[in-house]
Amino acid sequence: MNIAKSWIRDCRSLCVLTGAGVSAESGVPTFRGPDGFWKRRDPMSLATPEAFAADPEEVWEWYRWRREKIRGCEPNAGHLAIAAIERQKTDFLLITQNVDGLHRAAGSRRMVEIHGNIWVVRCTSCRREREDRSRYDVLPPRCGSCGGILRPGVVWFGEALPREAAGAAEEMLRRCEVLVVAGTSALVAPASGYAAVAKRRGARVIEVNPDETPVSELCDAVFRGRSAEVLPALFG
Ligand code: BJW
Ligand code: ZN
């Protein structure tokens, strides 16, 4: 741990990549864990434009259920540790795949949400986008401007990532000295390739995850523990 801590302390440019595991201890279900299923539906079959086109009401029911779960959740010590290390670094970027908004709630600012945000809705007709924390009695919710069906402002399989967020992430991966990868199964592209991109050009890569992942073997240091425990120790 001490060597990894010194890499983090001494680097000028630090990047942190997070996934659902970082919010697990806040009570947000992960995607691929045993609690990741909703009505025994595989999340991977719901997080697609095809599923939404076929049954927007059912996909929205899943998002409404998740929004209500997240509404009651607070950032944990892992989120707070990431926000605190940001304040100590001149060059820093948090790349998160999480849509729950807990990093921002914890105080993270230099951050990109590459899979969007569950509190944002976008009209499928006029494309207007806005934050909306309503509970929605009727599903699918409709656009106040044009009456079109609203969709969650998240990125589904087969969809492109928000251009600006993905661009900022790629730029950071090209220049960071240290990349910390926490709480992601590293199964979903393009984030699954980020560790390899940073590693290829000489960055130190550190993984924080209770389980092995496809990126574990390329890492310079691996901490098999929960992010709410490991991240405060690593960044402290
Ligand atoms: C802990 C812990 C604790 C537990 N502490 N750790 C073949 C067919 C079709 C598509 C593809 C294909 N091959 C590749 C693709 C591309 C596809 C992809 O990767 N698919 C794979 C599944 C094969 N990717 C895409 O389609 C992406 N877009 C794209 O590539 O665009 C290209 C393009 C360019 C130009 C035009 C058009 C297209 C988009 C991917 C979008 C992913 N979206 C989701 C849903 C977001 C919305 C929502 O939230 O509903 O994002 S899917 C889901 O997976 C979500 C997550 O962000 C993402 C990653 O999951 P994550 O975060 O890693 O969570 P888990 O649950 O998998 O893992 C949790 C981890 O935490 C585990 O490792 C635990 O051990 C650990 N953990 N407790 C620390 N306490
Ligand atoms: Zn509209």
Image: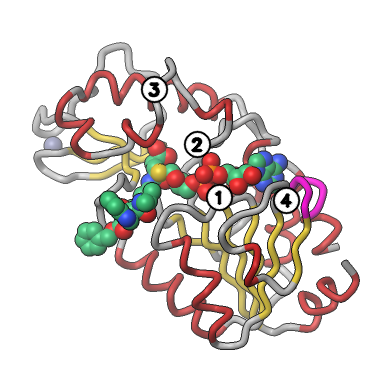
Mark before the other along the chain sequence, 3 or 4: 3
Q: Can you tell which quarter of the image residue 85 is in?
A: bottom right
| Residue tagged 4 | 80
Task: Bin the neighbour count of mark 2 within 10 Å (Cα to Cα): few under 14, some 14-19, many 20 and up.
Answer: some
Measured along the vertical axis of the image, is residue 37 above or below residue 161?
A: above
Front position among marks 3 and 4 = 3
Determine the residue positioned at 15% across, 26% down: 54
Position of residue 116 in the picture relative to residue 104 (left or right): left
Q: Is residue 185 left or right of residue 144?
A: right
- SS class, disc 2: loop
* Amino acid identity at mark 4: Leu
Mark 4 is surrounded, within 10 Å at the Cα level, by few (under 14), some (14 to 19) or many (20 or more) other residues, namely many
Disc 1 and disc 4: Cα gap in Å? 21 Å
Quadrant where the C terminus sits is bottom right
Report whether the residue tagged 2 is closer than 8 Å to ligand 1.
yes
Disc 1 residue crowd, few under 14, some 14–19, many 20+, Cα 10 Å: many
Q: Secondary structure at mark 3?
A: loop
Residue position for label 3: 41
Q: Nearer the viewer, mark 4 or mark 2?
A: 2
Which is nearer the N-term, disc 2 or disc 1?
2
Label 3 crowd (10 A; few <14 / some 14-19 / many >=20): few
Whether label 2 touches label 1, CB < 8 Å: yes
Q: Which residue is mark 1?
A: 185
* Disc on res. 194: none
Point 62% across, 65% down: residue: 16
Report the side of 53 relative to 90 (left or right).
left
Sequence order check, earlier mark of 4 and 2: 2
Q: Secondary structure at mark 1?
A: loop
